[in-house]
Amino acid sequence: MKARTPLTVLVVDDELRSLETLRRTLEEDFIVLTAASAEEGEVIMAREFVHIVVSDQRMPGTSGVEFLRRVRSQWPDTVRLILSGYTEAEDIISGINDAGIWQYLLKPWHPDQLLLTLKSAADVWRLQQENQRLSLELRDSPEQLVQRVASRRGRVRARSGFDRLTRAADSPLNGICDVAQRIAGHELSVLVTGESGTGKELLARAIHYTSERAERPFVVENCGAMPDTLFEAELFGHKKGAYTGAHEDRIGLFQQADGGTLFLDEIGDTSPAFQVKLLRALQEGEVRPVGSPRSVPVDVRIIAATNRNLEADVASGRFRQDLYYRIAGITFHMPSLRERPQDIPLIVADLFKKSAPAGSQSEVDGTRRGNPFTQSEGRQSPGRRFSDAAMKCLMAYRWPGNVRELQNEILRALALGDGDVLDAGLFSPQVSHSAAFITAKSPLFDPEGATLKELLDQLEAQVIDAALRRHGGNKTRVAEELGLTRVGLRMKLSRLGLGGSE
């Protein structure tokens, strides 16, 4: 990403020691100009392009407020701040009303706080310029702007469709995506369950951008990330002064998502007390900002997600039954990666393709079956690829972190590997360790030697055999590790010829 050009700050203070301290504090992040008086400051302003002015209030001859009032008149785009060891109410009111002062800072100031305030002022200046630029574009070329916005939305929709859920022809995700596409255009609330990293948010985005609400916002909130008091203000908004720290009115996420979709991730982590407030908002179609006497109507589609068993939480009283039925108009369960091993080669191929240098043709192009990183006979690959052993290792591992963990391992291998062929030794210890349990017999993923079903049976047999050896043949522990019942494990042992008798 291209680094931002530092903005220019003019510091005006008649105390030279204070002026030097301010300069040293700010010079790493800004171009700093200094002036020992208001008059000197105006001379610099006339000569240099200044983005931000910080002025002391009490100076000989001209006060800081009076100086900034003149700055406002001549250079209205400059962000203005006042610095003072005194807190006279009249000065503050005059500064805000007459000089348009953005921030009033008190002495003694803390360097970190001062720097944070100046960085916020820089953001304000950039935002002002962006707003002016957009206003000019809208005024001078509305059709061009509309086309540009439509083009950007089109790119977002293309990146957020069901194709983002990489899957094989026989993946269990196919049925889920088929049903999700059919209901996307209907105003059903959706609940997506599944382990962390299985792609719940990807499915939610795909539903939104396939629906009639695609032109409106898709807003995301993690329900387990903050306490109830802050979470309520985050979702519903608040009025200025509603609580300590509420310095201005704030629009909540419900209002930001008006007309679109609000994705509530980890909704199972909300407290029973907050669930009551959320239920009321969904039932009434309106929210009441914290500290406001009036409710605001909102039109929002809810897609919720959780890695918890909400039905069990309802039965135990931890989650409200009425809220559960309100959010679970239709439920999708995202399978774990170990439940869809046939998707692993395609996910790997997809990430390799995205990570390939611009202009290069990765070896992953072409085939959609077998090991997409095995070089085709008679064809020299200009890109990087995994060795057969590395791919077998990826297929044998159970991926408790699901697709997110797989992506991390691939990026790790790409970062650490030097050659074109990446081996299993580049994976993290827990993943590369699984390679030790791959047996030499029954070669995996040879499309010329077996059908897909036979290849999957080979994989399943090797994973179970490795687990049996890890646990000394203890089938109870093997079943727990692999997420199977003892009966299910016994049936697989019998079907795969691994000695299923007790």
Image (cartoon, helix red, strand yellow):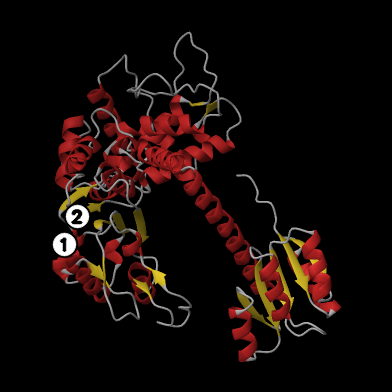
Q: Is residue 312 above or below residue 484?
A: below
Q: What residue would you read off at disc 2? A: 189
Q: Residue at x 39, y 40 (%)?
A: 150
Q: Is residue 360 above or below residue 38?
A: above
Numbered disc 1: secondary structure: helix
Decide: few, some or many residues near mark 2? Use Cα within 10 Å; few <14, some 14-19, many ≥20. Answer: many
What is the count of numbered marks? Answer: 2
Numbered disc 2: secondary structure: loop
The reply to whether the C-beta atoms of the residues labelled 2 and 1 are less than 8 Å apart is yes
Q: Image quadrant of residue 238?
A: bottom left
Q: Is residue 497 above or below residue 37?
A: above
What amino acid type should be assigned to the residue bearing mark 2?
Ser
Residue 469: image location, x then y, percent: 33, 40
In depth, the one of 48 and 205 nearer the eye is 48
Q: Is residue 107 above or below residue 125?
A: below
Mark positioned earlier in the residue sequence (2 or 1): 2
Q: What residue would you read off at disc 1? A: 326
What amino acid type should be assigned to the residue bearing mark 1?
Arg
Q: Image quadrant of residue 23?
A: bottom right
